[in-house]
Amino acid sequence: MSKPDEEYLGPAKQQKTEQGGSEFSGSISTTGNIKQGNRFYYQSYLGTESDDPSSKKQEILNWLSPLSFKDKHADELSKCLPDTGNWFFEKGEFKKSNVVRHLEKHFGDTAGIAYVYCDNKDREQQTAKNLISSLTCQLVEQYVGIPPEVKKSYINCTTERKSLPFEDHVELLLSVSRRFPRTFIIVDAMDEYSDPDNQGARKSERFLPVLQTLGASRVSLFVTSRLLEGGCQLSEDAVSVEILAHDSDIKTYLDARLKEESDLRDLVLSNELLKKEIIEMICIKSRNVFVHARMHMDNLATQTSVREIRELLHDLSDVEKVIYEDAIERVNLQQPKHVKLAKEVLTWISFAKRPLNVEELRHALAVRPRDSSLVQEGLRDKNRLVDVCKGLVVVDKESETIRLVHSTLQKYLNDVPGTLIPEPEVIISQTCLTYLSFEVFEEGYCASEPQRVDRLRQFPFLDYATHHWGHHLRETSDKELNLLALKFLEGSKYQPHCYSQQFPKGVSGLQIAAYFGLKEIVNLLLLRDAKVNAADSHGWTALHRAAEKGYEAVVRLLVEKGADVTAKDKSGWTALHRAAEKGHTAVARLLVGNRADINARDISGLTALHRAAEKGYEAVVRLLVENGANIAAKDRSESTALHRAAEKGHKEIVELLVYEKADISIHDIAGSTALHRAAEKGHKEVVQLLVYKKADIEAKDGSGRTALHRAAGKGHKEVVLSLVREKADITAKDGSGRTALHRAAESGHEIVVRLLIEIGAQVAAQDISGRTALHRAAESGHETVVRLLVEKGAEVAAQDISGSTALQRAAENGHEVVARLLMEEGPDIAVEDGSGWMALHRAAEVGHPAVVRLLLEKGVNIAAKDRSESTALHRAAENGHEAVVQLLVEEGAAVAAKDGSGRTALHRAAESGHEIVVRLLIETGAQVAAQDRSGRTALHSAAEKGHEAVARLLMKEGADASARDGSGRKALYRAAEKGHEAVVRLLMEERVDILVTDGSGRTALHRVAEKGYEAMVRLLVENGADIMVTDGSGSTALHRAAEKGHEAVARLLVEKGANIAAQDGSGRTALQRAVEKGHKAVVRLLNPDL
């Protein structure tokens, strides 16, 4: 019998459930529909659409996380029957939760929702970093556009070709979660996730503390987990509810199964008494464990008469072991080949290093020893693989993953002899090696990604075999299998990169054997003269591979056989770097004892001590220090090992380094001390230790920030409190004049803001821009912080040095809720900043219709003008915000209003090329013939900027293409002089006179010749422009081109018949003009004899 599970809905809710993967899916069954709802909501909420193409966003999403739980979620949803699980939502603990109120208010419209399904069979992929990045990825997918912090991280990482550190993933998740009014994160089967232990990978990269941090930051958590040793409590105020399979749910399921099973349907549906007896008995015997009910039904479905059904019901067991024994007995009653196949299926599922999908398993089971190619006739039918296991395995519908019916079955199979095939690791290793040796793979790695995808489609087991054959082989001692592996690694068929062009080139069989820790094979290869120091295209040797994986015996053997312990890969890493970074103390000791360079630096300047300190491996750090590692060594960012350890929160290592006289006052290239690093990451104990060791609490980094600034800006309350208790100056200002209160407010950390105010921080303090904490919180949209600051006396009417109020900052950034809150406090909504802009102008220019509507509802003057005499309509039109323009026009904005230059909103929209807005303005009465103070129409503006579509629309709506501006120039003239060929062609279609001159007597040809636009000159000449016409100074187009040195244009004019002897009003020829300006190429063109 499985233990009850626990679920947690934070920060105020915790539940318990009987089975991790299936019980909560119904409660979030609308998640798949929420994304579209969220996108619609945020287009209104933010008042703008994303300016990032969907392809770019998808590229960033792909970069963010390698994990997707969509298929798993769809699988779970497909299993949910209607009307099951409703009882849970009626429980008192759930009804009392604040979460319900928020769900009722926001769920489906505004909430950010992300989920992960933990699976102990997929630990290789389900690292803490990958789970966190998956949650972030899902939230970003629901957000309209791309959050700036995500875009910045993407650009930095892709530019520098590096991965995002774990801590930055955590910061991204926290930051993105705060962009939603409410965020819900669901983690299923937490008991199936294991944080790394002290001997494992990275101690600092743990999932549970991140969830605890999320729970403390206004994110609501819902976590399912069986009871774990030490508990799974994420919050002190969590509410726990035990959830077992409810009778009503089991009855609904059983009723559905009785209708689905054709054999049972015929026997039962006409016998209501029997149906009732079946349902009642299975409910009793399942003991509220859903999987037991399912297996009882699987057994019942094999009966052929009512008598057999009644006999089985009488013998039903409520003991899990007996239920599994019954299933195994049904397996063994089949014909021998079916029994063998069932055991093979169960064995592969049980011993696979990760979950297998059906196609992978079909291919694996089709392989026989000595096969040289895949025999298609050996592939079993998918249904056969499931049927022979008699209910012990299931296939997830969407992902096609084949798995055991319940996690408790794994232990039963391992404990009971005869249920699985003997020597499973030998069988699996042999199968993998045989598959990899297929002749088809002799052609080598794939030359392109489509080829790689196609190869994996044809040979789905290839990925698993490549990644895991050695792991299975390492757990065997079969000599014949070792020889098979040796033959594979040495033979011509061996292609380590047979399925991926991304695999490093030149990888030897020795490296692969070392990577998998296969000591016997490594020894055999060395006896056969394998080159011990051979490096691949990444510079890795076999020693690098074995050291990174921690295979001490292999490392010892390689060193004894002459491996170079000082060899560096292309990143400058030695084997000692690799071992230290992974925490392999024994390997590190072995390498140091064999004269590895303990202070060797990689290309980033990092030593092995830096790596071990950063990853939190105290034993390795102690080993390195005791053997002479330089604790003062700096990397390229001028960080010491102390900086690295402090930033990651490794207190014991910090203490060790300080004890060894590490300088705690050293600043890195950004001016940060170890105290800054620890404070920013929220490591209270490290901060307290450093302060105790006399770290300068007021030290400033390169931006003038103290440790208090850094901690406050990240919302670390306990660190802030610790620093304040040590007399940190809460009035200190950084290089931009911001206090810790500014930093906390702009990042939305309400708790820290409250704390700082309570201990004396001044809410009226201004930075060098004159902005208060209220300005910063308002522009970032942090409603709760704004409310708190106002309650604590912040002046809502305060203006910064540009004259902006907090309301204007909120309006400009589209924060409707904050703007409404500020307006309730009574500030003058018509106040102007230094440019004469009101909040309405700001909101309209950036395109926030919700804020614009709010301001109008509050009575702001829609016709108000700024210093340039622009109205909100001008600003919205110029920036192409259709929704805002529509709203303003509907509310009575004058489309004919002119700014200080005499331009209407139509001029502005046309000049900026916003076709939709131009159409909207014309439809609402804008005059296409309106002229500004320079006499220009909207057509002049569109033509000059090259907006062909807008120019076409304007002419369609009656714009006069022959109209002249104040300088006598037509739209064609304007387009030509700017080189907009498409617009010129469009205007020519309207029969515009291209010979018309401006106020200086110049034609369009004069202007384009002078500008050097060869293509435009050709176009005009070919369409009738007179090349001999002179302007007011008597100059021809050739004069203008020659004087400016445009050889190509001059040549074209000469070819078209221009008179090179023509003189201007001063009697000068084009040649003389070119000579005067020193344009030798033009001179030679006009007079080859010179």
Image (cartoon, grey):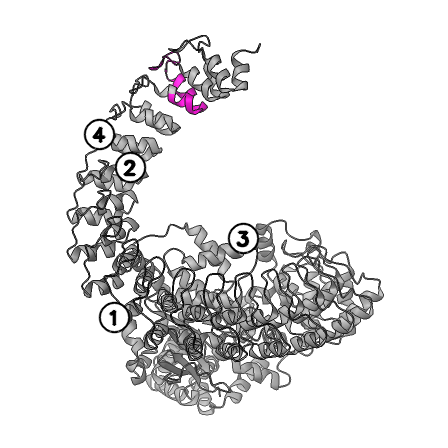
Q: In this view, does 955 lie to the left or right of 560?
A: left
Q: Earlier in the sequence, mark 1 or mark 2?
A: 1
Q: What stretch is highlighted in magenta?
A: 1007-1035
Q: Is residue 504 left or right of residue 788?
A: right
User: Residue at label 2?
Assistant: 910
Whether pointer 1 and pointer 2 mark residues with C-beta atoms closer than 8 Å, the reply is no
Whether pointer 1 and pointer 3 mark residues with C-beta atoms closer than 8 Å, the reply is no
Which label sits in the foreground, 1 or 3? 1
Helix, strand or loop under label 1: loop
User: Residue at label 3?
Assistant: 159
Which label sits in the foreground, 4 or 1? 1
Residue type at numbered disc 3: Thr
Residue shown at 40% from the left, 59% from the top: 736
The residues bearing labels 4 and 2 have C-alpha atoms spaced at a distance of 14 Å
Helix, strand or loop under label 2: helix
User: Residue at label 4?
Assistant: 958
The residues bearing labels 4 and 1 have C-alpha atoms spaced at a distance of 58 Å
Q: Which of marks 4 and 2 is nearer the N terminus?
A: 2
Q: Which mark is residue 793?
A: 1
Whether pointer 2 and pointer 3 mark residues with C-beta atoms closer than 8 Å, the reply is no
Q: Is residue 354 left or right of residue 1033?
A: right
